[in-house]
Image: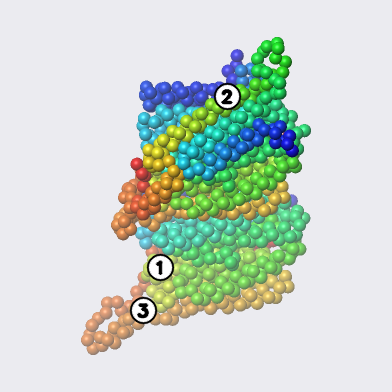
Amino acid sequence: MVEIVHSAAPVCAIGVSLVAVILMLISKGYPNLREFWTIGASILKFSIVVSMLPTILDGKVIEYSLYSILPGLDIKFRVDPMGIFFALTASFLWIITSFYSIGYMRALKEHAQTRYFSFFAIALSATMGVAFSANLFTTFLFYELITLSTFPLVAHTETPEAIKSSRRYIAYLLGTSIAFQLSAIFLTYNATGTLEFSNHGILAGKAPDMLLIIIFILFMAGITKAAMMPFHSWLPAAMVAPTPVSALLHAVAVVKTGVFVLLKVILFVFGVDLLSKLGVGTALAYFASFTIIVASFIALRQDNLKLRLAYSTISQLSYVVLAVALLTPGGITASVMHIIIHAFGKITLFFAAGAIYVATRKTNISELNGIGKQMPLTMAAFTIGVLSMIGVPPAAGFISKWYMISGSIEARQIPFIIVIAASTILNACYFLPIVYTAYFKRHDNEIYNEEWRMLNKGYGMINLNSEVRIKEAPPLMVVSLILTAIGTLVLFFWPSLFLELARMVVGGVI
Amino acid sequence: MNIAEHFPALVIVIPLLFALITWLAGLINRAFCWVIALTITFLCFLMSFSILNTVMHTGRISYHMGAWEPPWGIEYAIDYLNGFVLVVVSFIAFIVTLYSRKSVGLEIDEEKSPAFYSLYMLLFTGLMGMTITGDIFNLYVFIEITSLSGYALIAIGRRRNSLMASFNYLILGTIAATFILIGIGYLYMVTGSLNMADLREKLPPLYHSRVVLTAFGFFTVGLSLKLALFPLHIWLPNAYTYAPSVVSAIMAATSTKVGAYAMLRILFTVFKVEFDLNVVPVTKILLVLSCIAIIAGSILAISQTNIKRMLAYSSVGQIGYIVLGTTMANQTAMTGSIIHILNHALMKGTLFLVAGCVVYKTGIEDISGLKGMGQKMPFSMAAFTVGALSMVGVPLTVGFISKWYLATGALKAGMWFILPIILISSLLSAIYFWRIIEGIYFAPAVSSQHSEVSTYRSLDHHNPHPVSRSRDDAPPGMLIPTLILAGLCIFFGIAAYIPVSVAEKAANMLLGGT
Amino acid sequence: MIEIIIGKYNYWIYITLMMIGFYAMIAKGNLIKKIIGMNIFQTAVILFYISTGKVWGGTAPILWDKAVIYDNPIPHVLMLTAIVVSVGTTAVAIAIVIRIYKEYGTMEEDAILEIERKQAEELRKGNTGQREI
């Protein structure tokens, strides 16, 4: 049996940003002080998470019961390899995103910055809560908290369009979680009398197969944050939010919470054995495959950079689902690894998109001609992110693709190898043109200059705008996106820590 | 002589007596009325609390009015159930009284304020009496006291629409009360007793007697009307909409709850569970009605533009929840039902009090009037948000606790189809509350943080009510009670074991356990 | 059959009266007629109670040694309360009707509803939701 350590560290990790929110509200009038709290909280949170790492690597589990509302409704935390894996990813990226946010918000002179930073911090607390939750109730609690706390971020600009999108956002996330996830939780509780996660599932043998399948479907439909089709359209809608929000929350925290909860339900509520017996794993894998392919096709048609990234996210999230649905060691490793690998890759891409917007106010891919010359650092990082998305070494995306394919082979499911291959080609199809446009198409200024020069040939007029000047976003932003791009590379060369954690997850459930 | 022994009588007698004294004192100085009402409700709250405490330790209390032995004399019988309801009613009444001073000053003519407080005390007496009594004829008398003062309170405001609302309520309320009276008459005919506990013993051999069945029918219909169960709810929306805010708040939070309590008493104390389940399919009928009530109340609420009317329809749905839990006749669902008496009182109380604050500050009752209020009245709107989230049933609020018990209870009873109904209604309430919350915080027409844009926009859209958007919250006298209720919505969502421990015992008792 | 009709005539009277009152309360448009209906309705119930208290051959329930059989006094006592309630209800109802008459100038329900509908329409056209004082 796993050794259990009792420690309040997970609660501290969650609480630290909530405390920061109070401090932020107090220091409302002093932007520098307020931002200091954000940075401080993010660093502190990351350190607390890291401090738990050795214990977990020793094969122990940290548990902490905070409070029991009623029998069966406990707020309880449990740090296991998978939880710490997710927490590390999210808390580390929060530090970088904090710097990036400051750069972004200040460069654009956004309004309501206190609200923005406060809710950002709350969303991160809630993400930690999901990562460390020990039962379905705690998960549900923080899952809802994420939805509610990200709503003000999506509606941030308060334009009619933002309001409309945020309405869709809340309708999908809150609606499905109440309608489906909550009913699944009720049914689970009724069948088993407990909501605790367990390494081999809690539902096995507790209910007739038909009911189990219904519960499974309800869970899958209820965890909309994983953006599986047909419940995906909230994610493109959420792109009206400021870019740092899209970067951290809608490429990492929120959507990863979705797949993370999905993983937890699959592994710890149902259990691998039960799902193989029911045969719903394969069905889920087909569903995920559908999402992967269709979302990729939609992404191809998007001209808005952030929307294309959003559809790419939808497709990439389903990789995680597909991989775990294979229910093999390779598949589970792939899905866990893909959480962090996609996080680093996609956040880089979003950071780059935000940097382009701040520097040039451009949002469409068709306007990005020659931007590689104008913003070399940003576009270099962007390219690394793209490589990771496609799965080309030396970017980390290769690792998860590798395990995914080996997982498919273990499961003897050849169709999924085809799906993965096809989607890789599609990834390349919708990402490489951006890189191509950025580097090999001429910048508007160049074309403009040429025309100008031809027009004025012989008149000796000088055009002041003749060169494409380097015009990067503020340094805080550029540094952040370079860091995440480097992270993507580091993950390829030194993935051992995370692979170890993934192995522990697999060892626990199979 | 121990004064605490007489608390059951005192919680009725004191407010009844002071209903008159309040009015007399108002003749001298109108400011006295509020002070007296506040003191009395608080005193009653303390006494109720002490009574509940005693009940929790020693079990059922039986108080003999005028020392006449039951079943001849009037018995005041307090057990877990009505001890609990007593505390809820007196607490809400206290909070609303605390709130009432400013609101009454605005919404009711000044010379009527002594009359208002006098009627308010009568209403309070009636509600407490309905809850505490162990005698069905006494129950009828208190129902009428509650109703009569209720009719007058609804009509006391300045708005003339309230008159018709009150009159319609009066007609329907009288029908309901008279039906109950007929029911009592039939029971008395066959048993010769008016005492609830005595009836419980005497009735079982007569369960198949037609007289008893008729009595039961009259009771069910009469009480359903009183508690506004779905098809009989028509009096409620108008009454709550046009009544002064304080009256809407107290009535929404307590009087329908006490109606629900009375129904529980008749269904499960006067009659036994076996009767409800086996002799008359009343639980099935109520089950269907309450399901319809839950869905219909929510749907009707969505289409409303007046905030108080919306809350009133939402009450119709919530009453459905209370009845729903009782019809499954298992302990978990019954606990949910009883706990929802408290929870709904807290949530709806909060929401109606906030509505009152908004009316006080801006005079607007329309939902669109709440737009941008997040900056103008941050505390009130925070309370509203908490109340709304509770209604939706977000975890850590009281609404979730009720839903948890009702849903798990339904599943235990094997009634899986209840689950979608509960969840659909949560979704519907999410729709109608989210619409408001969004308006409060993110309405496009308002934004004071960057003033240039805001001035520009308001010029552009020409706001018909040029209300200032700077911070201007309700006065503390109104704000504090509102925030207390909102705080309790969260407190009892977290420390749920406190009310649940009482409610579980009450449920167990109603279902025939010890 | 005859026995049911004749022998229990008191119940028949009570039911008939109750239905007359009930009908008036629901169907009549004039508010005063509604109140009259309400009174008939309540009085019918009083009649019902009193008749249940009657014991054949019984006398007044006075402590008196010749009274061996006497009527049940409790329904009478209960009805004293019910009469008070009924009077109270009527008083409140009439008070409300007087105010309605002052405000609307009519006591016909249809006319009042018409006025309210018009008022609501005006409200919708003009300042929505402004307090009307």
Is residue B406 visible in this depiction of the protein? Answer: no
Residue found farthest to the bottom: A458
According to the picture, the residue beneath numbered tag 1 turns out to be A357
Query: What secondary structure is marked by label 3?
Result: helix
* Whether labels 1 and 2 share one chain: no
Outermost residue to the top: C65
At mark 2, the secondary structure is helix
Reply above or below: B183 against C128: above
Q: Based on the displayed image, in which of its 4 quarters is residue B331 positioned?
A: top right
Name the spot of residue A437 as percent of width and height, x first: 44, 78
- The numbered mark at residue C80 is 2
Relative to B252, say whether A50 is above or below.
below
Reading the image, the residue beneath label 3 is: A444
**Front-most of residues B138 and A5:** B138
Rounded to the nearest whole Å, what is the CA distance between mark 1 and mark 3?
16 Å
> Residue at horizontal 60%, vertical 32%?
C45
Looking at the rendered image, the disc whose residue lies closer to the viewer, 1 or 2, is 2
At label 1, counting other C-alpha atoms closer than 10 Å, the crowd grade (few under 14, some 14-19, many 20 or more) is some
* Side of B225 where A378 appears, left or right: left
Q: CA distance from mark 2 to mark 3?
A: 97 Å
Dot 3 falls on which chain?
A
Pinpoint the chain carrying mark 2. C
Point out residue B359 in the picture as x, y percentages from the top left corner. 40, 43
For badge 3, the amino acid type reads: Asp
